Image (cartoon, grey):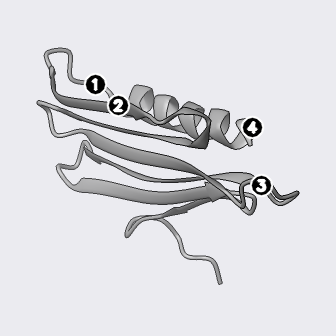
Amino acid sequence: MRTCLVFALCVAVASAAAISDSKNAVIVRSDLENIGVDGYKYGYETSDGKSANEEGQLKNVGTQDEAMEVRGQFSYTGADGQVYTVTYVANELGFQPQGAHLPKAA
């Protein structure tokens, strides 16, 4: 459960760090809702068009299959001027990203 949460947060931080190249950008929206051990929700948007939203919830509470499931998305404008958006789910099946620019599994 904690592993999935930590992984999802690391992905979010790494994604934000990797795509952050605007030195003058400011945060225009930032939301955080920590609802305890059952889950969380956060989102942000910057003046240069970057954004992210993520929500984590505990599934199958009280069973041996209890697991954290994280769903989210992040967007940014690439060097080519195109807006890239990635949506993802991270759960007991692993990290599952989707985006129009990402290759599809066969």
Locate residue 16: give its quadrant. top left
Q: Residue under label 3, please give it.
A: 66
Nearest the camera: 28 or 79? Answer: 28
Q: CA distance from mark 1 to mark 2?
A: 24 Å
Q: Give left or right: position of 66 versus 14.
A: right
**Discs 2, 3 touching: Cβ within 8 Å:** no
Mark seen at residue 3: 4
Which residue carries the number 2 mark?
32
Question: For the residue marked with disc 2, what is the amino acid?
Answer: Leu
Real-space Cα separation, disc 3 to disc 1, in angstroms? 39 Å
Q: Which residue is at 43% across, 52% downward?
A: 72
Question: What amino acid type should be assigned to the residue bearing mark 3?
Answer: Glu
Residue 91, position in %: x, y? 67, 57
Q: Secondary structure at mark 4?
A: helix
Left or right of 67 on screen, residue 99: left
* Near-viewer residue (62 or 39): 62
Measure how far apart labels 2 and 3 are at the Cα level. 24 Å
The kind of residue on which mark 1 rests is Asp
Which secondary structure, mark 3?
loop
Q: Is residue 46 left or right of residue 35?
A: left
**Residue 71 image offset from top left, x and y in percent:** 49, 55
Q: Is residue 69 above or below residue 2?
A: below
Task: Say which residue label 1 marks.
Answer: 21
Q: Position of residue 73 (x, y in %)?
A: 39, 53
* First of labels 4, 3 by sequence position: 4
Q: Secondary structure at mark 2?
A: strand
Q: Earlier in the sequence, mark 4 or mark 1?
A: 4
Is 38 in front, or is 93? 38
Q: What amino acid is labelled 4 in the image?
A: Thr
Q: Sequence order check: which comes first, mark 1 or mark 2?
A: 1
Pair 3/1: label in front: 3
Of badges 4 and 1, the one in the foreground is 4
